[in-house]
Amino acid sequence: MAALNLARLIAAAADTIAAHAEELTALDQAIGDGDHGLNMKRGFEAVRSEAEAFAAKPLPEALKAIGTKLVMTVGGASGPLFGTLFMALGKEISAEPDRANLTAAFGKAIEAVAARGKSQVGQKTMLDVLQPVHDALTEGKTGAEVADAADAAAEATVPMKALRGRASFLGDRSIGHMDAGARSTALLVRTVAQTVGESA
């Protein structure tokens, strides 16, 4: 983890979101506002534009700054939630985290997202991916296994009934669609796992 190339990681995350923006928008059009893909793309491009400045900071400060930028630029419901994830992670993580510190910090960040969104696991949100990822980290899974857990968790939101957010207004009609926030979270988890794995 100490050799983490944050600028490279930011670029990879922005590339991933841009490549899947239309897919995320289509998922969100089915049961949400229809703007998730564009909002996420705008936010991560804003982070990319300052990647070198973020990378020059100690990791905790960099994550907090990225979170602040996402809150300011993503918009919609996702901005505060993804921003909170990064800001809380930055607050808890050490400058050169080992797996135990990363896992503990990630757990605290999930709690912060749940509090911000007034939601919990099982309500068809990004938490339904974040918690299984934390479980996989706790169990000592490899990066590839963590990414697979994230993908499976996003897929598992399809049969769920949405209980939070715009999708909750649809009731049973929200069943049968993947949650866009869960999908974007899984995409980012796989990108981080692959990018960190390549530089390890």
Image (cartoon, rainbow, N blue to C red):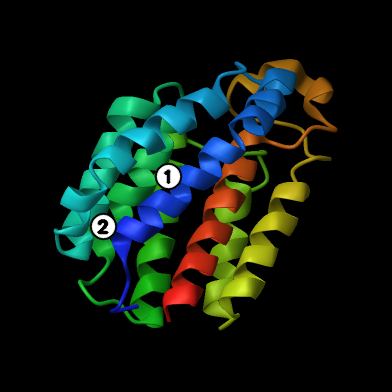
Q: Where is residue 31 in the image (x, y as percent from the top left)?
A: 71, 21
Q: Give the structural element (helix, strand or loop) at label 1.
A: helix
For mark 2, what is the residue? 90
Residue at the image point whose x is 61% and y is 53% from the top: 129
Residue at the image point whose x is 53% and y is 40% from the top: 17
Q: Is residue 145 above or below residue 167?
A: below
Which of 130/49 is in front?
Answer: 49
Would residue 164 be visible to someone looking at this image?
Answer: yes
Q: Where is residue 181 in the image (x, y as percent from the top left)?
A: 58, 37
Task: For marks 2 and 1, give the CA distance.
Answer: 13 Å
Query: Label 1 is placed on what type of residue?
Result: Val
Residue 48 is left or right of residue 55, and the answer is right
Q: Which mark is residue 173?
A: none
Q: Quadrant of the C terminus?
A: bottom left
Residue at the image point whose x is 35% and y is 40% from the top: 83
Q: In which quarter of the image is the N terminus?
A: bottom left
Residue at the image point whose x is 26% and y is 36% from the top: 69
For mark 1, what is the residue? 113
Q: Choose the circle earlier in sequence order: 2 or 1.
A: 2
